[in-house]
């Protein structure tokens, strides 16, 4: 069977499974999630061994440090997978809920019912934990899924696929409700994103090049974000201790994630008081600093930032710093250079903070918190299927509700239109 035939087979199976998933009970979906969690616990050693093969191959093939970091599965990461499955099982089931039910003058009642999207294709690089996050959310939201992980994680993903199939079977749900593409042939991606008869939406998770390609070539709707150019703005009325802790965490907690801060903005009134101490901490953590002219005048050993730096998602230990005149300048910089992902203000001024969260046009906007919190797990969604910076349907971390849509329902008692 060639790749196109193989993908069409997966699509046909997914479409059929989606009909069964749409009417599955909450109890059965939760039973499947808990059974998958049990399987992961039982297969922990196999998962780790398979992941080690993936990591070693990645090292041999010269995979960069950011991707290797995303690829590696520690015991803690496996525990998080299991915890995420349990958490999703405890979340309210959005499917079937009817809201906004109102009587019309004609006598009918009109409302909206939440329903699954259908078949979701998910394409991602590295991060085998995404396999479980995506599967859990699709199952709980009553969708079928076709998952195409990166070739670098093929060994671990195949073991995880076994766990998912076993869990679905234990709950008497179709095993084809979650299918993991078994081929590493890149033609599989091209096929998946051009099958509107079988796939209702595509969710890409990976580098900008991958997402740009999928957005350009897909024949089905795409939920996506391209960049994670996230900012922290330290206001003139910021608490110094909070500012330093947040700025350090937002940049150095993990370098290779889309919610990591890439540009630090500092109000001119507090730059001299905060930046030297902050720069010293960054240097101790081997973070390369690139700054505007005013930043260079204040700090030593800072590389001159150019226009490209404000547009760059480094995904590594590099930070761009700009001293700004005021809140207006900070908001203007973020809305011009940012990627509408996540931006945070550090300030004790309520009015200033309210202006920031109102006027910054991003999917997550924060006050006195690290950008690293922009995550479905941290938001209480149980897990996330991705981050959306689009402005329609789903925006920000996409959890259960983001994987459903609404249809109108009308309740009548024999009314006819006159």
Image (spheres, rainbow, N blue to C red):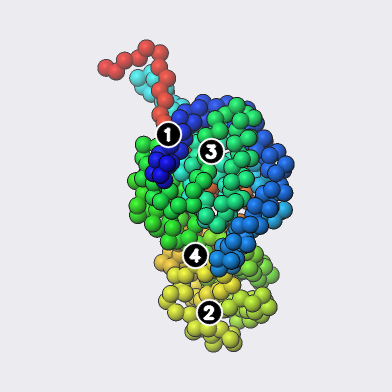
Q: Quadrant of the C terminus?
A: top left
Side of 24 where 163 appears, left or right: right
Residue at the farthest left position: 418
The 10 Å Cα crowd at callout 1, few under 14, some 14 to 19, many 20 or more, is some
Between tags 3 and 4, which lies in front?
3
Query: In this figure, which residue is indicated by the disc labeled 4?
Result: 229
Q: What element does badge 3 sit on?
A: strand
Q: What element does badge 4 sit on?
A: loop
Between tags 4 and 1, which lies in front?
1
Side of 363 where 104 appears, left or right: left
Q: Residue at x 57, y 78 (%)?
A: 289
**Count of numbered tags:** 4
Q: Does residue 260 show up?
A: no
The 10 Å Cα crowd at callout 2, few under 14, some 14 to 19, many 20 or more, is many
Residue 269, horizontal then vertical, whole percent: 56, 78
Query: In this figure, which residue is indicated by the disc labeled 1?
Result: 12
Residue 391, horizontal then vertical, whole percent: 41, 50
Residue 382 sits in quarter: top right
Which sits earlier in the primary sequence, circle 1 or circle 3? 1
Q: What element does badge 2 sit on?
A: strand
Between tags 2 and 1, which lies in front?
1
Q: Residue at x 35, y 52 (%)?
A: 217
Residue at the farthest front position: 1
Cα separation, mark 2 vs mark 3, equals: 45 Å
Cα separation, mark 4 vs mark 2, equals: 15 Å
Cα separation, mark 1 vs mark 3, equals: 12 Å
Which sits earlier in the primary sequence, circle 4 or circle 2? 4
Cα separation, mark 4 vs mark 1, equals: 38 Å
Query: In this figure, which residue is indicated by the disc labeled 2?
Result: 290
């Amino acid at each position: 069977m060639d790749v196109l035939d193989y993908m069409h087979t997966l699509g046909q199976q997914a479409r059929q499974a989606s009909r069964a998933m749409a009417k599955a009970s909450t109890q059965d979906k939760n039973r499947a999630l808990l059974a998958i969690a049990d399987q992961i616990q039982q297969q922990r050693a196999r998962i780790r061994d398979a992941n080690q093969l993936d990591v070693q191959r990645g090292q041999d093939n010269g995979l960069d440090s950011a991707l290797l970091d995303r690829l590696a599965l520690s015991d803690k990461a496996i525990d998080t997978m299991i915890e995420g499955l349990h958490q999703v099982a405890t979340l309210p089931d959005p499917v079937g809920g009817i809201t906004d039910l109102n009587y019309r003058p004609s006598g009918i009642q009109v409302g909206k019912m939440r329903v699954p999207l259908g078949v979701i294709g998910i394409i991602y690089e590295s991060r085998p934990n995404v396999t479980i996050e995506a599967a859990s959310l699709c199952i709980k939201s009553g969708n079928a899924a076709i998952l195409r992980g990166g070739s670098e994680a093929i060994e671990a993903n195949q073991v995880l696929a076994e766990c998912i199939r076993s869990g679905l079977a234990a709950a008497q749900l179709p095993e084809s409700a979650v299918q993991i593409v078994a081929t590493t042939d890149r033609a599989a991606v091209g096929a998946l994103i051009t099958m509107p008869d079988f796939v209702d939406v595509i969710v890409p998770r990976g580098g900008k090049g991958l997402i740009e390609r999928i957005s350009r070539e897909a024949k089905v709707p795409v939920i996506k974000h391209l960049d994670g150019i996230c900012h922290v703005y330290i206001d003139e009325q910021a608490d110094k201790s909070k500012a330093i802790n947040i700025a350090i965490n937002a940049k150095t907690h993990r370098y290779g994630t889309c919610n990591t801060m890439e540009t630090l903005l500092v109000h001119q009134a507090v730059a001299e008081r905060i930046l030297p101490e902050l720069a010293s901490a960054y240097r101790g953590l081997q973070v390369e600093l690139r700054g505007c002219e005013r930043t260079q005048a204040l700090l030593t050993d800072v590389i001159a930032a150019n226009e490209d730096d404000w547009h760059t998602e480094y995904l590594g230990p590099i930070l761009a710093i700009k001293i700004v005149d005021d809140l207006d300048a900070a908001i203007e910089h973020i809305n011009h250079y940012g990627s509408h992902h996540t931006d945070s203000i550090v300030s004790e001024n309520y009015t200033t903070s309210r202006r920031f969260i109102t006027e910054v046009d991003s999917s997550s906007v924060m006050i006195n918190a690290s950008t690293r919190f922009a995550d479905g797990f941290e938001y209480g969604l149980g897990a996330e299927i991705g981050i959306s910076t689009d402005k329609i349907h789903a925006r920000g971390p996409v959890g259960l509700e983001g994987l459903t849509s609404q249809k109108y329902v009308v309740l009548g008692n024999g009314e006819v239109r006159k």
